[in-house]
Image (cartoon, coloured by chain):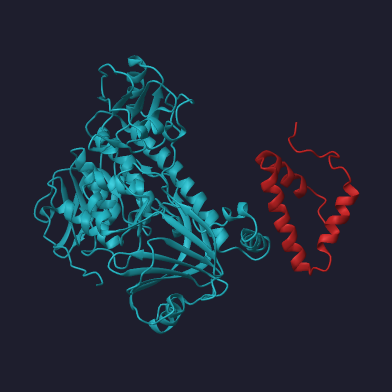
Amino acid sequence: MPYDYQPFPYTAPPGLTAPEPRHKVVIVGAGPIGVAMALELANYGVPSVVLDDNNVVSVGSRAICWSKRSLEILDRLGIGDKSVEKGVTWKVGRTFHRDKEVFNFDLLPEEGHKMPAFVNLQQYYVEEFLVRAALDNDLVDVRFKNEVVEVDQTAEAATVRIETPDGEYSLETEYLIACDGAKSPIREMMGLDFAGELFEERFLIADIEMTADTPSERWFWFEPTFHPGQSALLHKQPDNIYRIDLQLGWDADPVEEKKPEKVIPRIEKVVGHSDFKLDWVSVYTFQCRRLERFVHDRVLFVGDSAHVVSPFGARGGNGGLQDVDNLGWKLAAVLEGRADSGLLETYNTERTYGTDENILNSTRSTRFMTPADGAERLFRDQVLALAAKAPFARSWVNSGRLSVPCVYPVNGADDKALPRVSRPGAVAPDAPMGNGWLLNALGGRMVVLALGCQAPEVAGAEVLTPEITDEIRRRYMGEAEKTVYLIRPDQVIAARWPYVDRTAVEATIEAIWRGE
Amino acid sequence: MTALIDTPNLADHDGFYEELLATHKGLSEAESQALNAQLVMILANHIGDRTVLSEALALARKTPLG
């Protein structure tokens, strides 16, 4: 069954009749990133108003591959289990050249994590789950059909002018968060440059409804016989919906290519029959762009408004949720006076760093998928040819390197003898803990994780001393007898020591709040 | 100080040169290009040292070219 798009209710906002007091946070955009941002802030006790010019979830599957890290974040927002349950879990990707498999990858070859490597779930479901959670949350005030038409800021606050079906009003807010997408009107209104690269390539993207018995895997083809000379991607989604991406070339006419009489014969060749229904079609180009800065005093950019990447690494929606993860606790601390704007600046430095890694990876994949004539095409074609005869070349075949969180360049103490997977800057790896999971136990607080030792009371952090299981030993201790980890509220490891040193831990905590 | 050996290092270089040419024998221009591209990647993987490879690329890119 295709998705049933139900409009969310509009109610006249109070600001139409009397000026509203200055808000803490106003978020522009009720897409997955905007609503996730509001729920994340609500977890820290920060109220927000979410404005959206529309009143339905996004049309078409759009962002479908939610990474392990995203699922962990969604879990904190209360919709993790629901998303996994509804979605199609997968971890294996297969890459074919012509009709032969040349490469496959397993994104989570080990057990002992609450969340799977990836879940395919149409963006409209994620949006619906998030919006429902937001409507049930007293700290989130979602206002549909509220379109921001003007933005301004002073040293103390940002102001937005808003159009509604009942007229205009203004809101003042300590911070304005622009989650208004790749074409961000806020970015436009502020005249900010969105620099980067456009690739001269067009892809057709289609959701089809059909019954089939395919495994839950990601399949990518270079030059398949059903679509000669081009690339194709197949993903399975819930409700018997399949997502197909087909490379069209730069000369393709985007309007013409979206017509069912053009699309259906193309899909018939992919699936080998005509027993399917077309649910949604779009044609897109590849772009990798970002704002130079994500923090503009009182206006913060999060998600696609700050950065766009080409799609085959699942780094768009997942990158946006990592922004949310990074910003929530920092902004909450600034609003409650725990930290000053120096901490907010680390949102800028850390997320532009993460974005650059996403852009680097997706630019490389795009270049491999759509090589320019000449040397680019020569080497691409020869990697594919070589992959059939030499194992090393198979890993060079690049059909997208899928989203994993970056390792932030943090200044915290490290002991190189401890496992690399949990080095400072990395997201803390999950592990079973009692009847639950380590990441759930960490929550969104500053935590001292004491392993194989008793940590003393530490000012400004909770101490956690889980039982040493095989997974905890492997992921956090290695050969060490005891270790102490300091973990930030976004579950990023800040520092680690092979001994207990309360002074060092407390000094690191203070440095984190100062944004150092 | 470079990691790349750019002084004689191959016993029987005349023999290798002959074998290289023989490998290309009978190939079209495009096939020869393809073979060279594969050869570069095979050797790069075998060398397995990014510094050596970067220096090799820089040396090859230096003028005169062609």
Q: Residue A46 placed where, x, y %?
A: 19, 40
Q: Residue A368 placed where, x, y %?
A: 57, 59
Residue A203 or A17: which is nearer the viewer?
A203
Residue A117 or A424: which is nearer the viewer?
A117
Q: Where the N terminus of chain A falls, by quadrant?
A: bottom left
The answer to whether any part of residue A16 appears in the image is: yes
Q: Quadrant of residue A100?
A: bottom right
The answer to whether any part of residue A194 appears in the image is: no
Q: Colour of chain B?
A: red
Answer above or below: position of A507 versus A292: above
Residue A27 or A139: which is nearer the viewer?
A139
Q: Which chain is cyan?
A: A
Answer above or below: position of A468 versus B37: above
Q: Residue A35 placed where, x, y %?
A: 24, 52
Q: Residue furthest left?
A: A17
Q: Quadrant of residue B56?
A: top right
Q: Where the C terminus of chain A falls, by quadrant?
A: top left
Please report the residue visible at 48 percent of the width from the left and 55 percent of the height from the top.
A288
- Horizontal side, residue A501 vs residue A28: left or right: right
Answer above or below: position of A238 versus A510: below
